[in-house]
Image: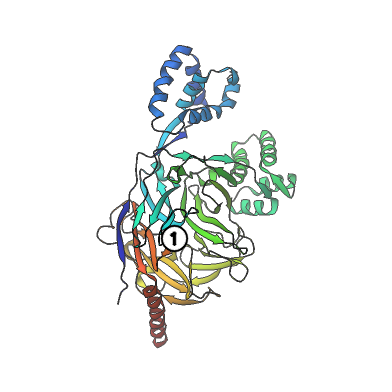
Amino acid sequence: MRLSIERKPIRINPDPKRVIARFFFNGNDRAKEVIQRVMSISEDIAFGIVSPLLQEYSKRHRNITRALNRHCSKLKPLFTELEIDYDTLTVYRKLLIGSYFTHEYSIESAAFFNPSIVEDPDQTELHEGQRRVIISFRAVGEGHISSITFRRALIDQANNITVLPAGSYIDEAEIVRNAVYNKKLFFDKAAVTQIDINVLNELESKLDHHFEYANLRRIIIDSQKLQESDMKKLEYDKVLWLADSYYEIVFSLDTDISDRVIFPISEYERKGIEDARFVHFKNDDDSTVYYATYTAYDGSLIMPKLLQTNDFYNFKIMPLYGAGAQNKNLALFPRKINGKFAMISRIDGCNNYIMYSDKINIWEKPIMLQQPKFSWEFIQIGNCGSPIETKHGWIVITHGVGPMRRYVLGASLLKLDDPEVEIGRLKEPLLIPNSDEREGYVPNVLYSCGALVHNGKLIIPYGVSDSSTAFAEVDMTELINKLIADKKETDKAEKKN
């Protein structure tokens, strides 16, 4: 007998009107030509062009003048080459130049999917049985570039879900680069990216055991000046791109959660930030913090990364290291197990692994946990977010890929004090695409990056064919009983064979 799954009558759809003002650059030569053209017009003409622009685009952006000024300032080296004193430019001419190096990017225009859900840090002014949650999404725009966006929602006593309206403006964060790098870890990661070993050895010999971004950048610039080959200079750039993978971002306190977007920042994630799996993590001292594992992608290299926040305004971001920090699908357990951090991963693209670590950013010695067993997951099995703790064990929502590359959701139950032991596993999918969910950006795909228990029900937000997000719920008692019963039945059948 199949489990009873209730699909919620709610769907979150992408909104192409949600745009950010991005820096646009088409090479040094063309940029210099544009700057010279703008410099050739009078102040009155410059004001006449930029004034209506500001009036129009201030209705679409929180602070368009800040964006235009920031984009103009990125061109300072070109002004120097053109022998133009940047500091003498008038306010309106800077804004006008900035506008020629700005374009609007619709972050949700292509797809809006793969949600994760966690409890909101703010649980004030709620009635008994209510819960405020934050849902993260993978938003995809032009060029298939992925970013992380958010919505806030309220779950009531009857598990009805109300997603609060999104704000009118989207805001990118301010970037802070104040990391101190561990030399060994940094260059171990650099070796994995296949950067020229001679370049790595040279830079490593010039750096202290711990170093800062500014020191590395200075050494790289000095080394590049001695190189004639553009290809060799590019190898030095790659090291700087890796250093750019460590950063902090800060959102303005006057932004709604729905107005905050985490957009690719470093070169190693320029093709997207994929499938963030948020988890509300409990430390040994009972304090809590939010982590998210996600995949950074540059078009060829996959780099697993970790994001940390306490309030969803300030985020720290760093790469993950080690033999277990490969490929996609890393999901952190919500607390330590036997004194160690624990993580599920899919390092080979096909099977689920589990691993433990004393340090949250270093993952070695992955242990095989699950392999595809049923026809609906013969291609691969992976997790759909962080494991959920119950008194019966850890519930892991899985995804399976079967015939016609149809993605479905499954579920497993792992032993509480030894999650290497599988004590329950559904033999049939928990959730499959129905007739209303098969069409979209990528047909026949259901996928989730996290679920949550509320009022005895497991609430699962899921991406619908990579185009929108829906919700389903299942009774926890029924699910656990079914997990254990199916496992026993499967084990019995395997013994007979």
* Residue 193: percent from left, percent from top: 58, 51
Determine if residue 378 is in view.
no
* Residue 139: percent from left, percent from top: 41, 47
Which image quarter is the N terminus in?
bottom left
In the displayed structure, would residue 161 be above or below residue 55? below
- Looking at this rendering, what residue extends furthest in the left direction? 435
* Residue 341: percent from left, percent from top: 59, 65
Tally of marks: 1
In the displayed structure, would residue 72 be above or below residue 466? above
Of helix, strand and loop, which one carries label 1?
loop
Left or right placement of residue 452 versus residue 286 in this view:
left
Residue placed at 61% from the left, 71% from the top? 338
* Residue 271: percent from left, percent from top: 47, 45
Is 458 or 128 nearer to us in this picture? 128
Mark 1, residue position: 450
Is 46 or 163 nearer to us in this picture? 163
Determine if residue 178 is in view.
yes
Q: What amino acid type should be assigned to the residue bearing mark 1?
A: Gly
Which image quarter is the C terminus in?
bottom left
Give the class, few, some or many, for how many residues have Cα within 10 Å of label 1's Cα (few <14, many ≥20): many
Residue placed at 36% from the left, 48% from the top? 111
Determine the image quadrant of residue 286: bottom right
Left or right placement of residue 180 versus residue 330 in this view:
right
Determine the image quadrant of residue 129: bottom left
Residue placed at 62% from the left, 50% from the top? 190
